[in-house]
Image: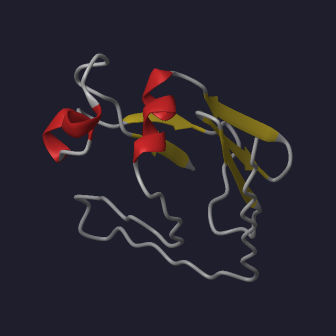
Amino acid sequence: MRVKTKVLKNLNAFEKEILTAEAWGNDQGINFKDKVDFDKFTLEIKVSDGRLEVILNGNESLVYNDINIKKWGIFDNYFKSGNCFQSKESNAFAKVKIYLLETFHYQFFT
């Protein structure tokens, strides 16, 4: 399982610049140590205040907590579920079966 996130080319870019696709460079990715293969697994995603945490099977956690994530606040964010399959192997394939999907959105006012 691999988690990827966007990285700004210029961390000092103004809000208007950040809204363009050209402001963002190559994705940064982190691999979980645990392999899921074709086994059933649980993935939890928590996003708040410039922090992104992805938890695999309640055991392993990857955290992005940097300026790139903090800059996401300018966007109307969304969630999607599925598979972004990428391979050049002729016999490669992917299969996705979602057993349960729950979303929770919390709005905090100060």
Above or below: residue 87 compared with residue 46: below
Residue at far right of view: 58
Q: Quadrant of residue 104?
A: bottom right
Give the image location of residue 50, x and y in percent: 58, 33
Q: Looking at this view, is 26 or 31 the one in front?
A: 26
- The percent position of residue 56, horizontal first and vertical second, equals 74, 49
61 or 107, nearer to the observer: 107
Q: Residue at x 75, y 70 (%)?
A: 40
Looking at the image, is 3 positioned above or below residue 96?
above
Q: Is 34 placed above or below 36 here?
A: above
From this viewpoint, which residue is outermost toward the front? 110
Q: Is residue 88 left or right of residue 32?
A: left
Q: Quadrant of residue 110?
A: top right
Q: Where residue 106 sits in the image (x, y, percent)?
A: 75, 58
Quarter holding residue 93:
bottom left
Residue 94, percent from left and from top: 45, 72
Q: Outermost residue, top direction?
A: 12
What's the residue at 72%, 58% (across, down)?
43
Image-based side of 72 in relation to 81, left or right: left
The structure residue drawn at horizontal position 18% and vertical position 46%, both measured from the top left corner, is 21
